[in-house]
Image: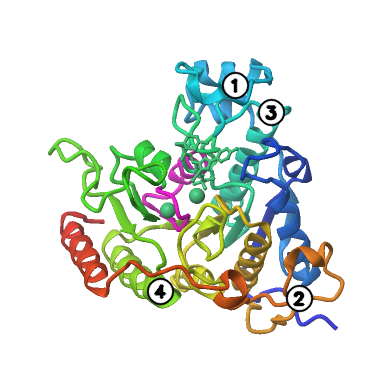
């Protein structure tokens, strides 16, 4: 018998669309929309659909996409056709229009549908929150944080997060955006650089010359001129390889705790990019499913309207584990679900081990060296505490 019951007193909605999951970026490309299918099947195997309101998300309209993106860009995105690019020439092409068609942001069949479905799910989630039908809304197909107003970047074409936050701002005075993807949430940060109604916080691996996108230094906190209300409202937490659950938990709790106290958000949007997990194909951290999920637990405790988005995540079995555990936290059944994967889980072989919580040894063999001295982490907390003196709700 399933131990999963509907949470009392609050509603969780789950937004996905199987049509989004069938798209392919290309054989060698790390972004695999199929990871969404794997995640959803594990979530459903645990019986969690019975504890949530489940919606097939719709495609966002052109006008909805244009709430953030330029029409020039959208028109090009809507008409451009996939063109076979000779592999050896693609990185030498100096003038990709809107950064479309290179190896990071390839043109593939159904690209516009893929983008509008991701944004549609994010908007559906935002509207369930603003209509108060949901307390927590989950859209694992969203979270594409690098896309700019008129430019694709880092596997992201449409910034569904910005579009969803713009919708929240129609109803709420202040929104806190938190990004635990291993990459800097540059697109969302830039979109809200000049407003004090959105505070953006990104935790990421920072190495300006060797790690994408190369932005997000500790003292990049928004254009600092006295006429810019958004000054000091961008918080960056630059990290090095190998950070552990324990260190991340300490940082996340002290930084987010202080920010919530000072900024007093009316809603929280948490981008849960799963490439910050140990063993990710592109990531460099040593986070486990428990440490990643602890961020969701911490955010949920504030009792504010909450949206959970996906994002990066390039080792599908770990992505599925993390987003399943995080769905269980949203629903409140995390202490009742079995740490052993359900016997009837589809694609069970994909998971290698039958546990929801593999050890670092199981994931990596040898853990990645931790290059985050405690002293540096304290300096980061100190800098952010000083930055927050300039912030008022
Ligand atoms: N790291 C990394 C990486 N790997 C690739 C890549 C690899 C194989 C391919 F067939 C195509 C692309 N690109 C990158 C990064 C972009 C990372 C984007 C992360 C997205 C997110 O998780 O934050 C949110 C969904 N791009 C680069 O590092 C740029 C290059 C500079 C180096 C790699 N080459 C392939 C492109 C140019
Ligand atoms: Ca991040
Ligand atoms: Zn990422």
Closest to the observer, 242 or 108: 242
Using the numbered discs, state the Cα–Cα distance from disc 2 to disc 4 in whole angstroms: 25 Å
Q: Residues within 10 Å of mark 3 (few under 14, many from 20)?
A: some
In this view, the residue in front, 183 or 171, is 183
Mark with earlier residue (4, 3): 3
Q: CA distance from mark 2 to mark 3?
A: 34 Å
Location of residue 381 by image quarter: bottom left
According to the picture, the residue beneath numbered tag 3 turns out to be: 108
At numbered mark 1, what does the secondary structure look like: helix, strand or loop? helix
Give coordinates of residue 26: x percent, y percent: 69, 35
Task: Give the residue at mark 2.
Answer: 341
- Disc 2 secondary structure class: loop
Q: Is residue 75 above or below residue 287?
A: above
In the rendered image, the residue lying farthest to the front is: 88
- Residue 206, percent across and down? 34, 52
Residue designated by label 4: 249
Q: Which stretch appears magenta?
A: 161-184
Of badges 1 and 3, the one in the foreground is 3
């Amino acid at each position: 018998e399933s131990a999963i019951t509907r949470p009392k007193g609050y509603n969780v909605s789950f937004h996905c669309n199987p049509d989004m999951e069938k798209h392919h970026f290309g054989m060698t490309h790390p972004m695999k929309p199929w990871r969404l299918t794997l995640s959803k099947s594990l979530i459903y195997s645990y019986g969690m659909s019975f504890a949530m309101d489940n919606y097939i998300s719709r495609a966002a309209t052109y006008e909805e996409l244009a709430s953030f993106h330029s029409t020039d860009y959208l028109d090009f995105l809507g008409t451009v056709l996939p063109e076979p690019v000779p592999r050896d020439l693609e990185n030498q092409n100096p003038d990709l229009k809107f950064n479309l068609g290179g190896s990071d942001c390839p043109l593939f069949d159904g690209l516009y549908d893929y983008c509008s479905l991701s944004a549609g799910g994010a908007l559906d989630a935002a509207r369930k929150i603003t209509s108060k039908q949901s307390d927590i809304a989950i859209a694992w197909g969203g979270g594409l944080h690098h896309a700019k107003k008129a430019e694709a970047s880092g596997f992201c074409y449409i910034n569904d997060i910005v579009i969803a936050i713009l919708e929240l701002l129609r109803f709420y005075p202040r929104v806190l955006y938190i990004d635990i993807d291993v990459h800097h949430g540059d697109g969302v940060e830039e979109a809200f650089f000049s407003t004090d109604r959105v505070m953006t916080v990104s935790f990421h691996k920072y190495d300006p010359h060797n790690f994408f996108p190369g932005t997000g230094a500790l003292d990049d906190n928004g254009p600092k001129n006295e006429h810019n209300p958004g000054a000091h409202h961008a918080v960056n937490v630059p990290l090095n390889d190998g950070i552990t659950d324990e260190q991340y938990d300490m940082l996340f709790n002290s930084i987010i705790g202080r920010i919530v106290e000072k900024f007093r958000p009316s809603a929280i949007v948490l981008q849960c990019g799963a490439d910050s997990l140990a063993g990710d194909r592109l990531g460099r951290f040593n986070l486990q499913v428990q440490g990643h999920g602890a961020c969701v637990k911490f955010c949920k405790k504030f009792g504010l309207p909450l949206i959970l988005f996906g994002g990066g995540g390039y080792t599908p079995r770990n992505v599925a584990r993390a987003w399943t555990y995080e769905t269980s936290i949203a629903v409140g059944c995390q202490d009742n679900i079995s740490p052993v994967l359900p016997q009837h889980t589809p694609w069970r072989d994909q998971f290698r081990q039958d546990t929801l919580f593999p050890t670092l040894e199981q994931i990596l063999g040898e853990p990645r060296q931790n290059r985050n001295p405690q002293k540096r982490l304290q300096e980061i907390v100190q800098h952010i505490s000083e930055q927050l003196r300039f912030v008022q709700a």
